[in-house]
Image: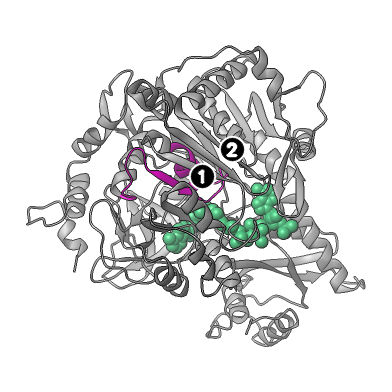
Amino acid sequence: MLSLQTFDAGPHTMTSQYERDYARALSDPEGFWADAAERIHWHKRWDTVIDASNPPFYRWFAGGQVNTCYNALDRHVEAGRGDQTAIIYDSPVTETKTRISYAELRDRVALCAGALADQGVAAGDRVLVYMPMVPEAVVSMLACARLGAIHSVVFGGFAAKELATRIDDAKPKAMIAGSCGIEPGRLVEYKPLLDDAIDIATHKPDRCIIFQRPQCEASLVDGRDVTWTDAMAVAKPHDCVPVDATDPLYILYTSGTTGVPKGVVRDNGGHMVALSYSMPAIYDVQPGDVYWSASDVGWVVGHSYIVYAPLLHGCTTVLYEGKPVGTPDAGAFWRVISEYNVKVLFTAPTAFRAIRRDDPKAELLSKYDMSSFKALFLAGERLDPDTLEWAQEHLKVPVIDHWWQTETGWPICADCMGLDLMPVKPGSSTVPVPGYNLQVLDDAGHEVERGKIGPLAIKLPMPPACLPTLWNNNEGYVSSYLSEFPGYYQSGDAGYIDEDGYVFVMTRTDDIINVAGHRLSTGGMEEVLAHHPDVAECAVIGVKDQLKGELPLGMLVLQAGVNRPPEEIAGEVVQMVRDKIGPVAAFKIAIVVDRLPKTRSGKILRGTMKKIADGDEYRMPATIDDPAILDEITDGLRTVGYPAS
Ligand code: COA
Ligand code: AMP
């Protein structure tokens, strides 16, 4: 069995491609990544592979000039791939299926870039994209890349206030929005949310390009809004603008430990190099293969593995506007795989739990020819062994759990299928990907022995594609990630590495929870609850959920003298979270309690409440102020069905 000790840079016998890549990426990062960079077209080659002159800030391929859109589209068209399908758009919610070739996509993107330029957008400007899963979302992202503008895509399930926070931080010159998203059974009108967000925000974008969907026509604001069709009608195709490899390609906001999201910055050069390396090495796909990431362009998985990596690698990518179940049934994924000869599917475990719930014996599978399908990759949350076994049993292909974050942009740990497939250990996302020097640390920042749990940290410099900083916030980058363990990036996850070198990611060390593969901050929800006039104190915990992995649950202590029915107040705070954060928070349970359990120093014991709600054993915290409160909490949780049987 493999041992990570053998991956140290020192001389020893190498046996596998994985070991060779892993060792070289650590001992000779410059050589390793310079070789990987040959997959990319450089308008100007780099001066240094890694600029380490200003630690803890590291810059990959400094001095180089590139264009990400050129590499994703034009390069392939010039090399003869123009007729190959670049995007398969499959939308059961609108009953649409279309294919867009590389040549056609390049032309559409060039036109959209021209339209953005007409609105005054130039290299370095930010463009906020608020779009459903339609090809125009991908076109918008690539058009920004073509111009050297920086896109910031916001997921459609967020509310106006969240959008406003991002507008104020990114200060976009222009916005591109769809008129609506389509959720099973309901239309989500984006335009009123967009208008509200611009009203709330201090910064006002000059222009909004509105993509009108036939399902819902949005009204326009005179002088500010222009329809997608009108903007394209007068636009001229725009060429690719070379930018510095270290220039930002995009900003993607993700939940931090407070209600204020963090603007993760992705550069152009390092991002392309790492993603291009990952496609054959991790996913074992080749140019021309059909690759499907069933995620959303609003999440990092969508950025990296719906849009950029498959196109950079010359694959066909599937853009699926639907759900794993209910559109129309739990055979939807199998239909897409068989209809388009998908080789690799990447999604979140929650999608498979939903399919299993509706079709426990996977009977719908027998309707489809799955012969093209070679591997299932899962990420976004811990892969529970039951779901792993179910998928293995029915799909009969490798099922690979891999661990990564918005911040890294590509997997930290995986079973690298294109290097050497290793035996699966349920609960483990296998081994660190070449380039990541991953360690489990103790409080003093020393590496712990094998099997011991602790914070998972990556020794600096991190490999290409990982965030070089937060948008306009170098200090926040250092304080959030680098200050706790100098010389390391602390991931916010804790876990252990076993004697064979397998990594087990167990839990977050902060207040982040994972709801249906979506990353959310309980602190952000507490901020909303605290604004209710009747609420004196509150806590939000993530409780176990069979489908979504975790669900947020709110506990409210009311102001003295409030006599209204508790259910009424609970209903109001549920609505507040939906209005302020968005439906994606899935915040549906709140209970009123007399007091919250605290330590003698006043710290709320969220971890203990979570254990009670999950039905896990817990030890009475030595520092608890009043142990009797835990009985009251247990009674309160029972009223809403926790612990679930
Ligand atoms: N725009 C607007 N609203 C959205 C939205 C979007 N893009 N995406 C989700 N929502 C809404 C949903 O309609 C739902 O609203 P509701 O409370 O009115 O029902 C709410 O946000 C929660 O959505 P979700 O968590 O997705 O739950 P669901 O019950 O609709 O679906 C799953 C459950 C498991 C089928 C679904 O979460 C899923 O497919 N997950 C895969 C996750 C994934 O791809 N993660 C990306 C990382 S790989
Ligand atoms: P996001 O930034 O939205 O991609 O969420 C990243 C977080 O999701 C990580 O920090 C983990 O907490 C969790 N996560 C992602 N993939 C995995 C995995 N394979 N196993 C366990 N947790 C995961």
Quick check: can you spot residue 407?
A: no
Q: Nearer the viewer, mark 1 or mark 2?
A: 1
Residue 577: x %, y % from top left: 74, 56
**Residue 167 drawn above or below residue 120:** below
Quickly name the residue at label 1: 302
Element assignment for label 1: helix
Q: Is the CB of the residue bearing disc 1 within 8 angstroms of ligand 1? A: yes
Residue 54 position in % (x across, y down)? 34, 33
Taking depth in this image into account, of 229 and 362 the one nearest to the observer is 362
Res. 153 mark: 2
Q: Going 42% across and 58% down the picture, which residue do you hit? A: 370
Range drawn in magenta: 282-308
Relative horizontal placement of residue 17, taking residue 324 as reference (left or right): left
Find out whether residue 293 is within the magenta segment: yes
Q: Residue at x 62, y 85 (%)?
A: 645
Front-most of 564 and 38? 38
